Amino acid sequence: MKNFTEELGINGHLTIIKKFTDGQEEVVFDDHNIIVSGMGVGLTYMFTGSGSNSVLDYQIDRFQIGVSGPPTGGETSAIYQLSGAATLAEYGGGSNLFIDVKDQMTNGTLTSNAAALIPANKITKISDASVRYTLVVDEEACNSISRNSTDMNINEVGLLMKNPTGNTADQPLLVAYRTFSNIRKTNDFSLIFRWTLNF
Amino acid sequence: MRGEVEIWDGDKLLHKESNLLVNGAGELLADIMTVSPSLSGIADHATSSILDASNYTIQAISFGKDASAYQYNAHALNSRRNLLYYSTPSAQGDDPNGQIYWNTTYTEVCSAPEILPPTQYENVPSSVAHALSVTDISTSGNGGFAFGFGSPLGAFPSWSTSGGQDNWFCYSVYIKSPVLDEPYHPYPYTSTAPRNRPHIKMQLVGENFDNLGGFAKSRSSTDPYFASPDFTTLSGVGIGFYTDNRGAATGGYSIDYWDEGSGIEEAGNGWYKVWTSVLAPVSGLSGINITISPAGWEASPTGETSGGIYTYGHQLELGRWPTSRQFNNQGYEANNWDLSGSVLNRDHSPGAVTDNGTVRVLNDPIPNPNILSYTVDPWDSPGISPGSYTAGEYWSANSTGYVASFSSILETNPFGGVSSVELSAPVITGGNWPHISLKEASAIAAAGYPVNQSRTFKKGYDNIYSTYIKKPSSNATSAFSLALQDWYNPDPEGNSVVFEFRGGGTVPTFKSTSYGYNSYLIEAVGNDWYRITLIIYGLGSGGANGDTVEGDGIVPFIMMGHHGLVDPTGVSLKRLWFYAPQLEQWPTGTKLSPTKYREVSGGVPTYAEDNLLTSSYVPTNYLSSPPNPESTRVEDGNTALFDTSSPLSGFNMGQNLNVIPYREQGSQLPNFLNLYPNDAAGVYSSFNVKKGQQFLDWRTAVYPPTIYSFSGMGSLGPQAYYLGCYPEGSSTGGSNWALVSSLDNSAAYLHVANGTDPNFISGTYNSIVNEASSMDVSGFVGKVYDAKNKVGVVSNPNHWQYTNNISDDPGITINTDLAGNFYQLATRFGSASSVPETNPFGGASSIQLSATDDLAALDYWPIMSTPKIFSLSSTHNITFSVYVKQPTGEPQGVTRFGINVYNVTKTHSTTAWYDFSGTVHGYPANGTPVFVSIPANTANFVGQKIEDAGNGWWRMVHSVSGIGDVASPNQWEDGDDIRLYLYLSDSDVVYTNVAGSALLISGPQMEQHPISYNLSATPYQPVAGASPTIAEQNGTGGLHVSGGVDATNSGTVEYSMLIGSGDVGYSNLYGGIYNMGLWTIDMDKTLKAGNTPPYSFGPLNNPRKYKLFSTKHLTKNLGFIEDSGTNAGSLNYTDLTIKWRLHFL
């Protein structure tokens, strides 16, 4: 039986573009995404009136970059967190990104994770039922990530709902996810994630 | 979205299907995701309210019908449109009553079949309709050809004075000028007669109108102006409207001001269709008079004109404009139904019970398929003498050697009725098997009794013989058979099938048959009743061995035991119960099982039995969506007056489509002559105003709109408001039942006991959808839930009674006895009554508790308590909440009060005391309650809360959790008796200080919730009487939401709504419920409309604009109901619960 997102036909499309400092652009990924169960969870809070009182808390206002995709079980709607979400430090101190570290809702538990906030002007309604998120990982962000002396490539990304439960401190919730081929991020280019959700 | 809709009748699931998501759902989510966060930085309330999440959730549910329903049910008018007995009154003698209806004055009327009719009717034979010449033959009097219905103008018609009241009547006729050899001729020629202007007038008078005032009179006329010199072509139109006493104040019209309807349109071959229409008064309609003055009507000098015109197709009908011709030549006399369509009008008679509309079914009657006789009780068969002689003229139980008997017994039949039929055997010593059989039709006829059809075997027709069988509780036969015997030559055939109660059980099973070409069915119908069916295809054995031939008589049998199985003596004193035998004959292959049982109480079906008036149609014309809750009309989109794009076009803007009757309008366009206006000045002017909207615009410009400008144009009339109802898809108890309802009264039923005279019975028509009426706006509109205050299907939590006004307590007599059944006030009280003090909810009144002035009586504080005992529970809390306000004038307010959840069993109080701060006894005050104290040993399990309710009101909440931790001997226990107390007190703790002082209270509520719910006082819900009404039980009706993300709910959101039985029935009156919709607020449209949140829902003035989120279409009317035997379906409506679940995971 189809669930909400399937029946409604919520889907997304992700295009990842490398944008070099000289202005050249290179599309490195162009495919659909995965709407995960968190979308249903967040909307359930909203439609039952049991979550936050503010509609802003149900908005997708942040994203995460990760380095350990794809997840062990594959890309399914059951994913509730990135396999290897970037830490605050890994987002890079010189970046223009505003990084917010919060307790993320992760399948009944809370996990402290960093996420980059999406500026409001990067959220655009492009049709009656479609919203485009333009996520910019600038030249100074997420560069040369290494863990345990091992170089880590960026290979997953997720969108998060702000705070559907209405908790005093935001508790974000993963609602969309996608892995992609390894990208070794350097300061030679920025990454632009053009992510469109069709509701 | 994965979701489903369930319809429940109590605990019975009636329907479950998936829903359909529409674009609005996705749009809503996109809206949510793109609301500007910057709004959160704006401080004003309206702006910040935009961010309220509840603005983006499901906020309403609506119910709609099939668009086709607008042409049926209560919307329908009768198919008999033309109320005139003869549409071609070519000779006065044609009238069934001679000259009573049509009469002439200075006028000759002659048939003129040689005149070519209007183009549309060129092919109508002259025997059906033809032209008449109507000629004014006098130059000294005004000639007229007149028609009169009713007093004082003519004979009484076959309808009553109330039948025509409050209806629009339109008279129309085709005219052509001049009559050959009888041209218009003014003599003497005066200045008032420069042109031929025939005068077509209609006049309606109210009951007992006496020309001196009395009740209303409606008059109008349309005068076509024929241009000289040949008087064949129209050049103008005059419209006359007579202001005789037509105001609401004196005449009694359903609208204060109204205007006539008039018009002319070209009809080809030199003909013009002329009509005039007026509104009949509410005060009964005692007369209708129509006059055609072919050469005009002249007052001075009187009737100096002569000449003739041709007329064709006279028609008097309901409504404001003429429909196509319905030619009546059979003298059919219109009756009340014809005047009223689906609903008889209200009874206006002073002193009589108000009838707001008696409903009948308009669908085609369904003939009774049962060709048996006396099926209700064979005892009624003539010739039967119970107990002695059982060989009746129809049914017989006679047998060779003994007489069986059959009788009506008090055994609940399959339809819930009280009686069944018992077939019982005497002591049998031999002979035939005990049975009951129906004589062959020819034998019945030969005896001179009426026969319900021939009952013979017919080639190409299957015989389906069914009856309900139940095994008696004792002395039951072990076997029985059904048979359709071919009784006579060429060779009789038994055609029997044997059934047995195998193993001594109560379930009949097939035993055997010697007639393998037959078939049988066994259907359990409950309560150990089974419908047993024998089917013989075509000629049965005729196909097998040629024994049965066309025309052989059929003799139906029900028999105990069977030949060849056991000896008949074994059936001695045995019994068998049966009910509702039915034999049907259908063309081979068209029916595979018996149809619903239809009784034949006598030898032949009564009219009612043979004309089952029920309706059931498959919706074919779905509206595009359920009705929008924001609309005051059912259909979205443009249904402007002259717009033909919609199936609902032609209805007046603003009309509630749920209560207007459908009327064929031909092209759907009211037509008006292209020439206009009233050329009173004698100048043949032509404004060349086009039909339709241009005409309307022109008229608006010439005659600035007033409150009565257009009442006569285009719209269908105020009578729509009163037109009631008929339940589509339901029956009304045979055909004798009728349902009475209208917008202003939906609380009575009619029962037509003898098929003629209505007798009122009482009935309750529960409606919970909104306060105004069930379907006054947009079908049903569920009230919005408050996401924060009402989660889940919350029944009224208030255990108290008569919470609106203590003095409503039937045990209380103010100033005499304050010890009521639900409130008990000690003698220290002076009064407890409703006073005109705005309560916390904005209502006009509050309850004022006043202490007595009798100082001697004040030996303690005045106490108000509940006599009712509540039981303590260790797993529940008990919360007593009440709104209080310190009076600001006289009487002076108390300065202290107390609230106590009192353990009667342990005589232990939890009294919390409150002082009104800043106030002193004896002074006007409006203080703020401040907590003072509670007993120390209750502090751990008693909670208090003070909520500011505004306007000096405070909600005091006193909650006791479980059984607390009070030490012995006062340790509270499960089951302890609890009562609630409220004290008037004084901050100086001097009893007599409260003398004459008062406290205003409102909204007392006691509730009990599981401790785990963490609920104390939920929003106050009134209980006006001893128990909550349906509306009170469900808040304000409306939509409730429950669910969530947890182990139980798994991301499921459930919206539920109770549709009251009355609403179900009421919806049926207008076509049932065929679609449903869930709606969210369309914030964008709402804000653009200038409405700022927060939005308060109002059924008649709703600031919200809605977006459709999900829909559900139904192929069967949600309110479908059937009669059960003689129990009218219309009396059996039950509340339905809609459960609409969305699964987000």
Image (tube, coloured by chain):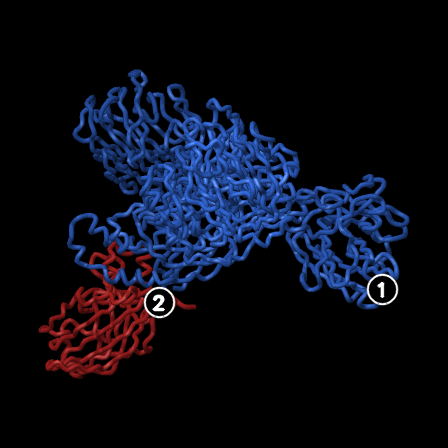
Chain colours: A red, B blue
Q: Residue B427's spot in the image, x, y percent? A: 86, 47
Asked whether, in this view, residue B513 is left or right of residue B145, the answer is: right
User: Of helix, strand and loop, which one carries label 1?
Assistant: loop
Q: Residue at the left extreme?
A: A94
Residue at the disc numbered 1: B547
Of badges 1 and 2, nearer the viewer stands 1
Chain for numbered disc 1: B
Q: Position of residue B218 (x, y in %)?
A: 47, 32
Q: Which amino acid, by three-letter code, is at mark 2?
A: Thr
Placement of A150 over or under A98, stated as above or below: below
Q: Secondary structure at mark 2?
A: helix
Calculate the distance from the C-alpha at mark 1 to the C-alpha at mark 2.
69 Å
Question: In the rendered image, which quarter is residue B1144 located in?
Answer: bottom left
> In the rendered structure, the residue with mark 2 lies on which chain?
A
As drawn, is B678 to the left or to the right of B957? right
Amino acid type indicated by mark 1:
Asp
* Residue placed most toward the observer, B1080 or A86: B1080
The x and y percentages for residue B243 are 42, 30
Q: Is residue B180 above or below residue B992?
A: below
Which mark, residue A5? 2
Asked if A31 appears above or below B1109 in the picture, the reply is below
**Left or right relative to A2: residue B844:** left
Residue B1046 location, quadrant: bottom left
